[in-house]
Image (cartoon, grey):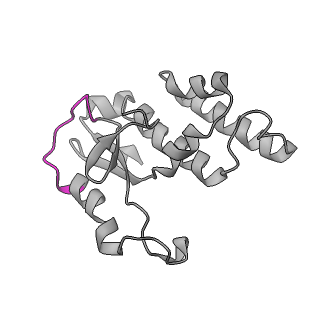
Amino acid sequence: MISLIEDKGKIITLGSTAGVMSFKKITNEALKSRFTKDLTKEELYALAHEFEEGVEKGNYAELGWPKWGYGISKLIVNLYHKILAKYPEIVSRSIQVNVCCPGYVKTNMTSYKGHLTVEQGAITPVFLVERPFEVDPATQGGLFYECKLISFFGNE
C-alpha cells in the first residue's frame, strides 16, 4: 500500500490509548522491557505471536500479559507506526506517519457508553490530516491523543 501514497503524503491510523493502558498492566518486567526497546518489525510480530500462543495455551496471564486482548492489539498497532516511520521507502519519500486515539466515543463498539460524540472523536484524526506537512523526528511515528503527542507507554 505504501506505493500508492504520494511523496510527502500522510499515513494516519486510528489506534487507541487502550494500548497504553494495556502496557501498564503487563506484570512481567522482562516482557515489559521488550516493548520499550527500539523494536524491529520482526520483534514486534514475535511479541504479538507470544501473546497469541499464551492465549491459545491459556497461560498468558501467568506469563505477565494483561487479560485484555483488545488493549494488547492496540499496543501492537500503535508501536507498529513507530517502526513503519523508519522504513526506507517512508523516509526517502518523506511520508508522514502517525497513529491516533479518537477517545472513548459513543458508537456501537462502545455500546454507546463513550463520553465523546463522533464529531468530538474526529477532532484528533482531522487535526493530523490538517496539520502542516512536516516530517518531524520528534513526532514521526508518534501516538496522538487530544491533538497532543503522548507516550506509547504512559510515562509522560
Residue 139, how many percent across, how many down?
Answer: 27, 35
Percent across and percent down for residue 70 are: 61, 54
Q: Tell me the magenta residue range.
A: 129-139
Percent across and percent down for residue 134 are 16, 38
Q: Does the magenta stretch include residue 137?
A: yes
Q: Can residue 18 be seen in this view?
A: yes
Does residue 62 show up magenta in the picture? no
Relative to residue 38, is residue 93 depicted above or below? below
In the displayed structure, would residue 21 be above or below residue 106?
Answer: above
Asked whether residue 5 appears in the rendered view, the answer is no
Residue 86 higher or lower than 61, as above or below: above
Query: Where on the picture, by quarter, is residue 83?
Result: top left
Q: From what the image shows, is residue 137 above or below residue 56?
A: above
Most extreme residue toward the right is 57
For the C terminus, the image quarter is top left
Q: Where is residue 23 in the image (x, y as percent from the top left)?
A: 56, 39
| Residue drawn at x 27%, y 39% as measured from the top left | 95
Magenta stretch: helix, strand or loop mostly: loop
Q: Nearer the viewer, residue 47 or 93?
A: 47
Question: Which residue does the image show at 38% across and 44% down from the upper left?
Answer: 2
Residue at (59%, 24%) from the top-left corner? 34
Residue closest to the eye, 97 or 76: 76
